[in-house]
Every structure is written in C-alpha cells, then in structure tokens.
Amino acid sequence: MTEEIIIAGFGGQGVLSMGKILAYSGVMQNKEVSWMPSYGPEMRGGTANVTVIISDERISSPILNAYDTAIILNQQSMDKFEKTVKPGGLLIYDPNGLTRLPERKDINIYSIEAADEAGKRGLSKIFNMIVLGGFLKLKPLVAPEFIHKGLEKSLPARHHALIPENEKAIEIGKELLKPVHILN
Amino acid sequence: MGELRLMKGNEAVAEAAIRAGCDGYFGYPITPQSEVMEYLMAEKPFERTGMVVLQAESEVAAINMLYGGAGTGKMVMTSSSSPGVSLMQEGISYMAGAELPAVIVNIVRGGPGLGTIQPSQADYFQAVKGGGHGDYKMLVLAPASVQEMCDHVKLGFEKAYQYRTPVMILSDGAIGQMMEKVVLFDQVPRRTDAELIEQCPWASNGRPKTRNHNIITSLDLDPAGQERVNLKLQAKYKVMEQNEVLYEEIQCEDAEYLFVAFGLSARICQKAIDMARAKGIKVGLFRPITLYPFPSIEVSNVGNRVKGILVVEMNAGQMIEDVKLSVGCKVKIEHFGRFGGIIPAPDEVVRALEQKIIGG
C-alpha cells in the first residue's frame, strides 16, 4: 500500500499540521512516511501545501506531480491541484470561498463543509481535524488508536488536554462528508 | 534500536550533532537551513551535554570560529546555505591547509547570487572541486534521506578526525525541510580534556613541558616547505580515495540503462525507475554517497555494462563531468537537469531517458 496525498490551502488553516498529524500517526502504525512542505515564495504569499506519502515500502521520491488524493481548501489550490489527481483518485474540498467547483469526471469527488461547521461551533482551530476526519472515513490508512498517538507526538505537551476535542472533530468530519461525483 | 522520531532533515542534523558529542556549533541564519540553529537553541544542548551554540555575526565569522575551535581539537560544526557557504570558502581553504577537522553542512538553494530559497544541487563543483583556493579536497557526503542527514553527521565527525580534514555534508532545501522517520543513534559523550589531548596530539590547547608548541597554520613562506605540505595533503587524499568511497546501486543487476544521481535527485530517479520499468524499460540507479572521493571505479563497472546513462541533477551539468571521466567514451552519457530551485518530476526524468538516451 502506498498513498500519495497533497493537502493544500491558505497558511493558517492548519494544512501543514494536519499533514504532520497524519504522518506521525503513520509512523506510530509502523508505516514509512514522508512530509514535504512548500516553503518557498508561494508560502510567503499566503498559500501552503504539503505532500504526505504513507507506505508499507521504502518511499522513493518525496516530490510528486500526481496524487492519489488531493485535499483542497482554497481556490488557488483547486486551480493548481485538481488536474494532478490520478485518474480514479480522490478529491476532497471545502466549498467555503470557492468560486469554481471541481469539474473532473474521472475521479471521485467529495465536499466537506468544515469551515462552516468549525465556525458554527466557534472552534476554528479544529477545522483541519474535521477535514482529516473526512479523509480518514474514505481512506482509513491509520487506525484511531494510532491517530491518538500521532496527536500526542505532534502536539506540544501543553496542548495535550485538547486531544479529545481534536478526536471529536475527526468524528464530526466523518459525518459531514458529502459525495459530489462518484465513479461507478 | 535507537529512538524513533519524525523529523525534518535540518532538525536531524542538529540532533545528530548533539548526540555525536559535538563541542560547538557556530552559524548564521539563512533559509532553507535556519531550523538547524533554531532546533539547537530550543534544545539547549549547553544544558544537556555542555555543547556551545553560538549565532555568529556572519558566515565569515562562523567559519573562523570553526577554525579556532578545531585548532584546539574541539569537535565543531557549522551549517549554511549556498550564498553563506560561498562566504565561508576562504576559511574552508585555510582549514584544509591547516588540516583542521570540522563538519560543514550546506543545505543548497538555487543560485547564482542570492538566487532563490528553493532546493538545488548547483554547488556540486564548489564542494568537490574546491570552492576556495589551492589544491585541497574535502570529504563530501550527499545524504538522500533524513536518516542519512542524521547518520552523516556522526560519520562526518569520525572521518574529519581520522583524516584531519574538513568534511562537507552537501544536501538541499528539500531534504532539509522534509520530515521522515529517523532512528537516532544513542548519545556519545563529549570527549573529556584528557581524551582530547590523547586523540589530538597536534591540537593547540596548552603546551605541557613534554613537547614543543603545536602551531596551527596554513602559512609556509618557504616554497619547499609549502610543497611538502601539498605533498602530504595529496598523499592523504590518495588514501581517502582508496578507502572512503560510498555508493548505492539500485536495480542495476538487469539494467540496460542507468541513472546516475545523488541526494534528492536519486530519490526522484527511484520513482522514475518504477515508472520506466512499468513500461518495460530496464533502468537502474547508481547513487554516489561520497561525491569526493567519487566512486569512479564503481560507476565505471556498472556504466560500462549498460547501453546508455542519464545523469540527473538539479543543476546544469556538474557531476556528469566526473561520470564521463570515470566511465569513458564507449557509453552514451547525457544530462538532464532543472535549475534555480525547480525540482524535476519523476515523469520528466522518464521522458528525458526516452528522448535523450533510448531514442537519441
């Protein structure tokens, strides 16, 4: 099993930390992982993305231009990454703020209104965990107990009290997912 | 087994320095390697092992602090990125001349000039052909993973002291910034003063009555003396060339074509191998791990068994010169590169193999 994922959105949405929690959970489950962030000029302009690879085998290139899954959280990222999903692959997006929805017919597409839900609950910081929950429902690459360990490892100890809230957000995300275009 | 962590390449370098028993780190911030010093400052090794961490006023100051520290036998390290390493070249040449051990990490970014902050391999020539003046070499290690970023620091210090030479770790912004699993080696205690005096009888760290002054210098105005220094250095490099070559061969046994690549490019080539083999193209990878000493005999052995070689680098064609010198002219050798911070994608590499080598 190898899963190649791009997570892309604005800086501040928790894109990099979501990738880190996913990667650390993979490590806890004894998978091979790589986490490759954008750190260049595009990041300094406000957008952020991270490539996460989780595999049972040694990972070759940490840099890719085609992905099994794209998790897209703003319009710039939709414009850049919709076309990079492999045929038959998966695209998950949050419609909040999007002006153009995905148009591909050869991939599975789901929406998740995570920004809206996080706003309603007054918990903008768990936005990324809601999105992660949606992804994990479709691709349960790591078991919940390892997500827990991943959270413990990636969050500083002073934030460990917030782990149950993060886990709850993941569960909320699983319920929020809506199919948009499903391949037969 | 050691401790398992998920770390950035830059963080792994920093933690490895602490664990290798490093006495001092001197550096100046520059993207994409600033996490090395950030990690050290946060980790406070001055409380953990007594290791000094100092932000110098410039890269020029940092490399001269290395010269001073190494001159007393202390285990010292610096890190920077391309423009900063250019500033250090005078000091590196002096250290090679004075035979001072140290580890210098270059997390390469796109040049020339200030260039960009994105990854590149365009400092190959500077690292292996002597970016400073005079006939000198450094042992140059090219890690291709976060694990190797960690391991090469320890190996680098071992070799630096074994040969009394500066050692360079030549990595790039992508390997510095990315996180992978790393198994950390156990803490090696910092050497005591008594151990240091025993292991570094050449060091200038206080003269006991039993010997003359140890003088650390790269200056000898007498040309005959300076030639002797050069002959000694060249003899040392010969031994390094015989004993210190490191490389990796991947899927070379049945290969009809060969990629030669180091560092991040080698990782991209591994993906390209999978894609090419799915199309029925039997291609393998030869990955030099030491860039100096270059694995000349080894790449020649593999290279002369195949129909064509594509050297893949994030530069305009630097290591290809060493590949050509090694393999000779019986086999077709071409270069594929992206520059200025662009990382080649695996499918681009496969296309280049098809166009430049198989179809060309």
Image: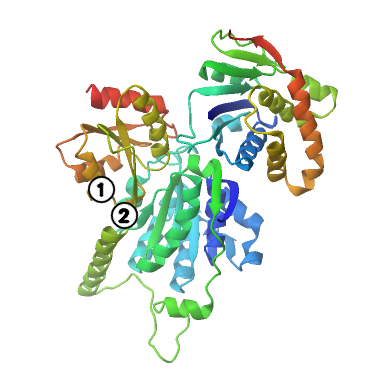
Numbered badge on residue B298: 1
Q: Distance between the residues labelled 1 and 2?
A: 9 Å
Report the number of numbered marks. Answer: 2
* Residue at x 63% of width, y 34% of height: A19
Horizontal arrangement in the rendering, residue B161 relative to residue B352 (left or right): right
x then y, percent, for residue B2 = 56, 56
| Callout 2: chain | B
Numbered badge on residue B245: 2
Amino acid type assigned to the residue bearing label 1 in the image: Glu
Dot 2 alpha-carbon crowd within 10 angstroms: few under 14, some 14 to 19, many 20 or more: many
x then y, percent, for residue A117 = 80, 21
Sequence-earlier tag: 1 or 2: 2
Q: Are marks 1 and 2 in contact (CB under 8 Å)?
A: yes
* Residue at x 52% of width, y 78% of height: B193
Horizontal arrangement in the rendering, residue B133 relative to residue A130 (left or right): left
Amino acid type assigned to the residue bearing label 2 in the image: Val
